[in-house]
Image (cartoon, rainbow, N blue to C red):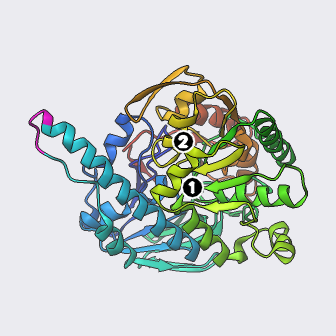
Amino acid sequence: MQIQLFGAAKEVTGSCYSLVTNNEKILVDCGMFQGNKDAVRKNYEDFDFDPKKYDALLLTHAHLDHCGRIPKLIKYGFKGKIYCTDATKELAFIIMMDAAKIAAQDIEHENRRRAEQNLSPRKPIYNEVDVRAAMKLFKIVSYGEEIKVTKNILAKYYDAGHILGAASIRVEVKEAGKVTSLAFSGDLGQEHAVLVKDIEPIRNADYVFMESTYGDRLHPPLEERRKELLRVINETYKRGGKLMIPTFTVERAQEILYYLGEFFQQKLIPTMDVYLDSPMAQKATAVFTKFPQYYNEEVRNAIKKRKDVFSFPTLTNTESVEESKSINGVTKPCIIIAGNGMCSAGRIKHHIRNNIEDEKNTLLFIGYQAMGTLGYWIKQKQKTIRLLGTQVRVNSKIESIDGFSAHADYEGLIEWLEDFSKKPKKIFICHGEADQSLAFGKRIEKLGFKYSIPTAEEKISL
């Protein structure tokens, strides 16, 4: 059996594992690369494998860096089944359709530039037709259900506690009369997450492929990030400013809405208008309300009191571009929640351009900022930024609450590893910047785990 990483090797995005035996081939995830131009360019390159030859794909969850290249996979001839949970299927459809829309817009802009240089036009990575074709291959599975993926490969999904429907996957491979078990962590969530249940452990595996996004960092306790959010809201209100919160469509937007509803109900913040300026986040929120079985006990109890925990009287869902632009005319304190979370696309870019030069306003980061993205440079305290063809000064207050991450910190990752009843033969550390992966490797080595940090396309024979 041979494993290769065609993404998320010494980097966070582009998750894609290839598992090949003598007779069968499957993939685990097929996500987009995000970050600087070099990273994004990889999405347009040909696959380093032949999609037509793969029998199935196991999808851990619906984030773009895990599902974003699936329609391209189908476009290149993949015809196998795509296994995932019910919530993941619905969220992935929203995410991939939005990616197709953004790709069309980006390529239109790119082709205008290429035309000026007498270069041939490019095609988008995929379109909405490709997304709909991909959805026909999706097959829903439940946590704990054993799936016969191929004749000699079995899989079982476990709740990863990351986002709605996210999973870690245990795979059993029978080859030459021998059974080898592998665990793919997917993205692991924090203990006591705001909305979803805690991680469900995998008890045994011969080899583990695991994420290391925060391999050398600790998150503050849940109550501390809650207090920080309250502080930022109230301080911005006192300055008479707008609070801009770039959010990821899935989980993070819903977490903020949940907290705001709670704050208003308990009168911890002044009454003010809140704009969810993301049609995509609105669609994702509708999916969240459809699957309450994945919520933790606290949220389920809150539903008994508030029914709709993602809504409150001062919330406005802006759908059209005109409605979004109208927020520019708001002069009183308000909160603007818009995507995307790294400020690399979406309506948040327009809000930043229109508001970042005003000292009264606040830009609050509540998620990971991949190197090279606009969010990354602003968070690095760059004084001027070029945005939508305009040079603007960063005068607004820049705040960051890292504890909102949907990823476990290094203690959470270690706890997941220590839940194995017997130490795996080797831990392959991926889905992390090189320094985070190395730092995590050194930590678990002290605990008696053997580890390796694979490079992209390295052939791992097991």
Is residue 432 found left or right of 244 in the rendered image?
A: left
Name the residue: 80% across, 44% down.
225
Say which of 342 and 22 sits in front: 342
Q: In the rendered image, which residue does mark 1 sit on?
A: 277
Q: Is residue 143 visible?
A: yes
Quadrant containing the N terminus in the rendered view? bottom left
Is residue 333 found left or right of 226 in the rendered image?
A: left
Q: What residue type is labelled 1?
A: Asp
**Quarter where residue 196 is shown:** bottom right
Say which of 433 and 55 sits in front: 433
Residue 166 % position (x, y): 60, 64
Cα separation, mark 2 vs mark 1, equals 10 Å
Name the residue: 72% across, 77% down.
293
Q: Is residue 428 visible?
A: no
Residue 27 % position (x, y): 41, 62
Q: In the rendered image, which residue does mark 2 sit on?
A: 351
